[in-house]
Amino acid sequence: MPSVVVGDITRLETDAIVNAANNSLLGGGGVDGAIHSAAGPELLACTKQLGGCPTGEARITPGFRLSARWVIHTAGPVWRGGNANEAALLANCYRHSLQLALLYQVHSIAFPAISTGAYGYPGEQAAGIAVESVRPLEQNFEKILFCCFSESDAAIYRKLIDAT
Ligand code: AR6
């Protein structure tokens, strides 16, 4: 069963952390900016080689100066009101990140609340998709963390996880 932690995802010591990136993979604000700052300039040099990432897909790089060995970069959907395939695309982010993690023998992984910041996805709906999307693959991992930036976000996840 996944767990919930509150704090800065860059400080976690899981094998992999997931980055809520954009299609360019060239960095940005929010959690993406925090991960690039903490990992160091080697991360940007590496993501520049990847040629971007379509929405809902995932790419992997080393974590460089992070404690996490790997960063899995996924590009979430921009919220456009809910009728632009956002839910399926967001579910793809979680599923593809976990599939990539399995290929790299990742045992522990932490997700931020993808798309819920700059991309405007409503937090409760996004949390529901996150919890549902990891469920089919969770038995393949020792630890799956949802890393929330606020206690109020964490409360949403805890309620959903406890209800299942
Ligand atoms: N640790 C954990 N969660 C964080 C951290 C952190 N250090 N910093 C922010 N959050 P966002 P998005 C939370 O905007 O909506 C970037 O510019 C934040 O409170 O980082 O997917 C990218 O380059 C929110 O709950 O990502 C893209 O252009 C969640 O992380 C765009 O933003 C996601 O917020 C992606 O937007």
Image (spheres, grey):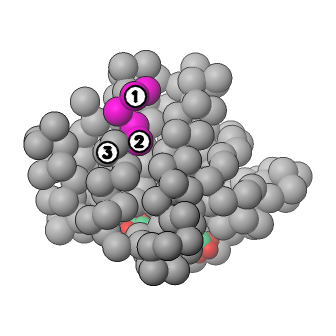
Q: Quadrant of residue 162?
A: top left
- Crowding around mark 2 (Cα neighbors within 10 Å: few <14, some 14 to 19, many 20+) is many
Instruction: Find residue 131 and name its label.
Output: 3
> What secondary structure is marked by label 2?
helix
Asked if labels 3 and 2 touch by Cβ distance under 8 angstroms, the answer is yes
Residue 108, percent from left and from top? 43, 29
Residue 10, percent from left and from top? 47, 54
129 w.r.t. 20: above or below: above
Q: Is mark 3 within 8 Å of ligand 1?
A: no
Residue 156, percent from left and from top? 18, 60
Residue drawn 29% across and 54% down?
128
Residue 4 appears left or right of 23: left
**28 or 159: nearer the viewer:** 159
147 w.r.t. 70: above or below: below
Residue drawn 18% across and 65% down?
151
Badge 1 amino acid: Pro
Asked if labels 2 and 1 touch by Cβ distance under 8 angstroms, the answer is yes
> What secondary structure is marked by label 3?
helix
Badge 2 amino acid: Ser
Residue with the mark numbered 1: 136
Residue 162 appears left or right of 135: left
Residue positioned most to the front = 83
**73 or 78: nearer the viewer:** 78
**16 or 75: nearer the viewer:** 75
Instruction: Find residue 133 and name its label.
Output: 2
141 w.r.t. 128: above or below: above
